[in-house]
Amino acid sequence: MHRIIHKIIGEKIACELGFTIQNTQIFVDGSTGPDSHADFPHAVGKNKKILKLIETARTSYLENDEYAYGELANALHYIQDKWVSDSLSEEEPDLMVDDDQFLEAIKSLTISEKEIEEYLEMANSLLTVKNHGIESWFDHSWGIWHKDYPSCVYVFADIVEMMLPTLQPDSSITGNLENFKKYVQTESFNKATREGFLSSVMTNFLYPKLAGYPAAMYFLALISPPSKLEIAKVNLNIVYRLSLEIARYTLSPPELFQYQDSWTYKTENKQMSLTFVVPQYHVLIPKPVREVQEERRLSFYDETHSFIEEWPNIAEGLPALKDRSEKWKIILSGLVAFLGTT
């Protein structure tokens, strides 16, 4: 997206939310900040940065730090680039204020019915947040969960791989796959990982990663275009409205919210970071946390046994995984062996 459009959207959001003159300047300046960060392309691979900036902005806002406005504007820049490329004209953007006009523009798109339905679902969600508040769209008792039992296993393999220099500093072992396979079968590896692994699987399966407003903000921040097609006008209007709602609920006082949690006020205890929630492993489940927790508690051992039974097929497919290292695959096999002895 061209710099001038980032600024126009920034000015419009600042006006809509009633920012002070000083905060408006910080916000608008921040809307083009990433263009000087030398981390192109901005349209892909920035989800973790987006989440970190939004979280930092919220924390700074609660500490009365005016640069919260700049941090959030940086995050919105990456989100906007995800939706709209530089192919959109630098002229004054056509931002549709009228909700009905906005919906009609989507209905008239020359794309598949399925894609139109996806756009309309997204648009209606944003209109619900705008017109009736975030609580009308998102139940405060919903949460972000590990999407399934296998994801709870895989994420611990990620952790072990990351901790390898500490667990096994001997490069003659970690640097040779045959030696590494033998190490993973040793009592040393067992003692270092088994207890933490089994506890992690149970905790991650039975408890949400995030709940309440942090879960809602995480979900809003990672909404992506449902179509790979370049539908500039509609995408521009969706990302404007998306940016507006993220800004509204990041840069607003606790009184705006119906409920109180770690997002609405500053707590002494360190809260789970948004950046620790990974789309690859996690999903928003629109059910009350207690209901999901009870369902998972009752199914935990069945899920464990099902995973063990399916493991031979999973293991057979591991060599084809291109986004996983050979060490990760070896670690995963070693961890799964623990499940069979529980």
Image (cartoon, helix red, strand yellow):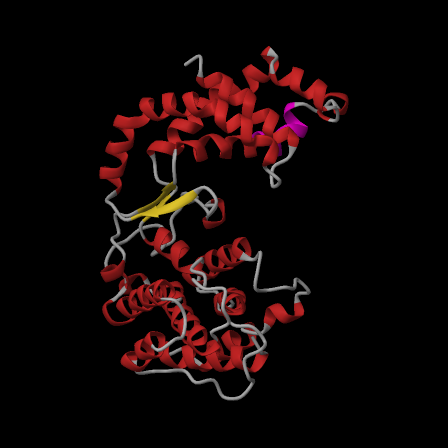
Vertical relation: 104 (above or below) 223? below
Q: Position of residue 37 (x, y in %)?
A: 66, 65
Percent position of residue 197, x then y:
48, 24
Left or right placement of residue 153 versus residue 102 in this view:
right
Q: Is residue 136 left or right of residue 206?
A: left
Q: Is residue 81 magenta?
A: no
Q: Nearer the viewer, residue 340 or 292?
A: 340
In depth, the one of 19 and 184 nearer the eye is 184
The quadrant the N terminus occupies is bottom right
> Taking 178 as reference, is 44 left or right?
left
Residue 295: percent from left, percent from top: 25, 33
- Identify the residue at horizontal 41%, vertical 54% (top origin): 218
Residue occupying the far right of the picture: 172
Q: Quarter of the image holding residue 298? A: top left
Q: Is residue 286 left or right of residue 236?
A: left
Viewer-side residue, 61 vs 151: 151
> Residue 193 occupies which quadrant of the picture?
top right
- Relative to 25, does residue 54 appear above or below in the rendering? above
Of the pair 325 and 168, the residue shown nearer to us: 325
Q: How many numbered marks, from 0 up?
A: 0
Characterize the magenta stretch by its predominant secondary structure: helix
Measured from the top left, where is residue 20 in percent x and y? 42, 79
First to last magenta residue range: 160-167
Q: Is 164 included in the stretch rendered in magenta?
A: yes
Q: Is residue 106 above or below residue 324?
A: below
Quarter of the image where the C terminus is located: top left
